[in-house]
Amino acid sequence: MIYDLIIIGNGPAGLSAGLYGARSNLKTLIIGAQLGGTMLDAFLIENYPGIEEISGTELAQKLKKQVEKLNGEIIEDAVEKIQKKSDSFEIFTNSNKKYQSKALILALGTQHRKLNVPGEEKLMGRGVSYCATCDSPFFKDKTDAVVGGGDSAVKAAMLAAQHSKKVYILVRGEKLTCEPLNEKNCKKNPKIEIIYKVNVKEIKGETKVESVLLDNNKELKVGGMFVEIGLAPVSALANELKLELDERKFIKVDSSQRTNIPLVYAAGDISNAMGGFKQILTAAAQGAIAATSAFRDLKHPK
């Protein structure tokens, strides 16, 4: 079986691309390791038009239902390799399955950046976490630390504060870089303390996180450590296809989400579109544009 369109990645960009591909009567398949992608990290979304508030998990399920209602297929599996043939693409997955497609959309998203300090790898999953949505309930009545100063860090701190007795936000710069509303809500939370102009030097503990050492030589006793310092593109598959990347390793696309390889498109956080404005809304928009471009190029090849 050869699909018209295969989408790699099932976050907001991939699911939106699947929706528009299926609506265009393209035989569409979405492959991704975890439904929702990094959207699952969002415990509360309040800026998606038309929806007052929703969790990332719930939004992912709603998008999945829309895609499947239009006969789009969704498979939860990890893609390991892509081979370009003369008139198609072969996709190989972790479960030893092979799929073939005429067009391809990469909606691979990003992965969490790490601190790369002593103790981080050793204590990963033992107090060190990159997902407050997933793990903050495990630190009930403890003291936590969140590293970062952007929206993801502030939201992680506010979520952690629902469970913990105290939360430190460790900010490298002199101020937070999040949206003003998030900053306001964070600063009025009595459980949250913001420490500026510090970097994490070491995470300490034998079998679990016990403290964090800062570069000002202060040591904070904490039980949980949430790292929210940004995201890096997942570009290994893009390298296989010899796609053109920018200096930060994001896939270069034009205004129609086309890459330098015919019938290969990129959408969402993996692309360099939207001026680096990484939001669920912009990812979904790029997915819709990419699928529409694929439909046009398949039906009217140059």
Image (tube, helix red, strand yellow):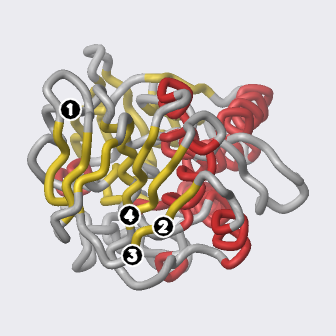
Q: Is mark 4 on a helix, strand or loop?
A: strand
**Are the residues flagged by discs 1 and 3 in contact, CB closer than 8 Å?**
no
Say few, some or many: other residues with alpha carbon within 10 Å of mark 1 (under 14 / 14 to 19 / 20 or more).
many
Residue 183 is situated, as x and y percent measured from the top left of the image, at 64, 72
Q: Residue at label 4?
A: 170
Residue 125 is situated, as x and y percent measured from the top left of the image, at 30, 27
**Are the residues flagged by discs 3 and 2 in contact, CB closer than 8 Å?**
yes
Q: Residue at label 2?
A: 194
**Are the residues flagged by discs 1 and 2 in contact, CB closer than 8 Å?**
no
Q: Residue at label 1?
A: 123
What amino acid type is highlighted by mark number 4? Leu
Relative to residue 92, is residue 269 drawn left or right? right
Say few, some or many: other residues with alpha carbon within 10 Å of mark 2 (under 14 / 14 to 19 / 20 or more).
some
Q: How far apart are marks 1 and 2 (CA)?
A: 23 Å
- Label whose residue precedes the other's in the sequence (1 or 3): 1
Q: How far apart are marks 4 and 2 (CA)?
A: 6 Å
Relative to residue 27, is residue 142 drawn left or right? left
- Label whose residue precedes the other's in the sequence (4 or 1): 1
Residue 252 is situated, as x and y percent measured from the top left of the image, at 35, 74
Q: Residue at label 3?
A: 196
- Residue 244 quadrant: bottom left
Say which of marks 4 and 1 sits in front.
4
Residue 271 is situated, as x and y percent measured from the top left of the image, at 42, 67
> Looking at the image, can residue 2 be seen?
yes
Q: Distance between the residues labelled 1 and 3?
A: 24 Å
Residue 252, placed above or below residue 112: below
Say which of marks 1 and 2 sits in front.
2
How many labels sit on residues? 4
